[in-house]
Image (tube, rainbow, N blue to C red):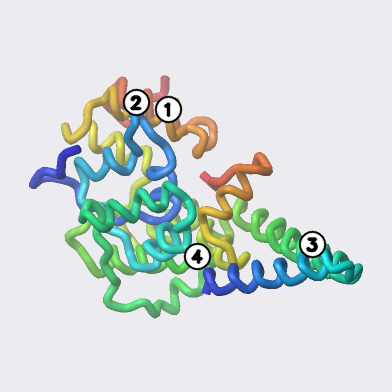
Amino acid sequence: MGTPGPTSLKVVVDSASLITAAKFTVDGHTVVEYLAQCCLLRITPAVHQEVILAGATYPDAAHVQAMVTDGRITVASPPVSAASVLDGYKLGRGEKDSIILMLTQPDMDYLVVDDRLAFVVSDRMTVPKILLVDLLVELVWQGCMERQLAEKMLKAIAPRYAPGFIPHTLTMLERGERRCLS
Amino acid sequence: MSLMSTELLQDTMDFLSACLKEGKPDAAVRLELLARGFEDKLTELYEQFQRSECSFGYMAEQLGITTWDLYTLLERRGLRTTNL
């Protein structure tokens, strides 16, 4: 599989989205492998610990570790980890550090986050955030990914989402706009 | 911290299971209490998660298990693993 081009999106990936992208496959490759072809993927040490090191007995976690080892996913520490405001929320270490990393690395395009509380807190801090399903849409619209491939991935990861998300996303791809009602 | 808690929990369960095999009946009671405590905490946190009062990562940390373990646990029970 290839590597991202110079105009690729740069994204910080949180645990929940990373696990989803690591668990589901399309045509023999995991979703995270396809993402690594068209995005620069960055995770915090806390997410690395939560998803990869602590999950070492899971084959999917080992697969993501291989992507860290070969550089397709990079691990970056936030300059600070103490955040009393964030500590007031019931967020995990990985979610808090991912938000801090986004706040301190303005060159990153999005925080990929699929947890509702983490999404809302990111929004309150004006962190550019995106659901994994919307990242796929963005990649198609930026010409970084084939629409048919994105559709296959959406169908693969459908079990992770509540009703409404996948059909809406497929309609977005079909119509070429987010504000579609039917 | 999460890994440490998981190891401690596993260690306690292994210890109680060994006691049970050796014919110490109180081990069964203690094992049941341990499981019940975990179940109570899981139920409470899962309700908070569904109401978006806590995140998935927080729930795993508080239970002392990995995020993968939590996914597996919830999936085995047919529970949703997302609050979206």
Q: Nearer the viewer, mark 1 or mark 3?
A: 3
- The residue under label 1 is A155
| Quadrant in the picture for residue A119 | bottom left
* Residue drawn at the location 29% of the way across and 56% of the way down: A12
Q: Earlier in the sequence, mark 4 or mark 2?
A: 4
Confirm whether circles 4 and 1 share one chain.
yes
Are the residues tagged 3 and 4 within 8 Å (C-beta)? no
- The residue under label 4 is A91
Residue sitting farthest toward the left: A6
- The residue under label 2 is A151
Are the residues tagged 1 and 3 within 8 Å (C-beta)? no
What residue type is disc 4 on?
Answer: Leu
Q: CA distance from mark 1 to mark 3?
A: 37 Å
- The residue under label 3 is B36
Q: CA distance from mark 2 to mark 1?
A: 6 Å
- Mark 2 lies on a secondary structure that is helix
Confirm whether circles 3 and 4 share one chain.
no
Mark 2 — on which chain does it sit?
A: A
In front of the other: B50 or A24: A24
What residue type is disc 2 on?
Answer: Glu
What residue type is disc 3 on?
Answer: Arg
Mark 1 — on which chain does it sit?
A: A
- Mark 3 lies on a secondary structure that is helix
Confirm whether circles 4 and 2 share one chain.
yes
Can you give x and y, in whole percent of width and height, for residue B61 in the image?
A: 55, 66
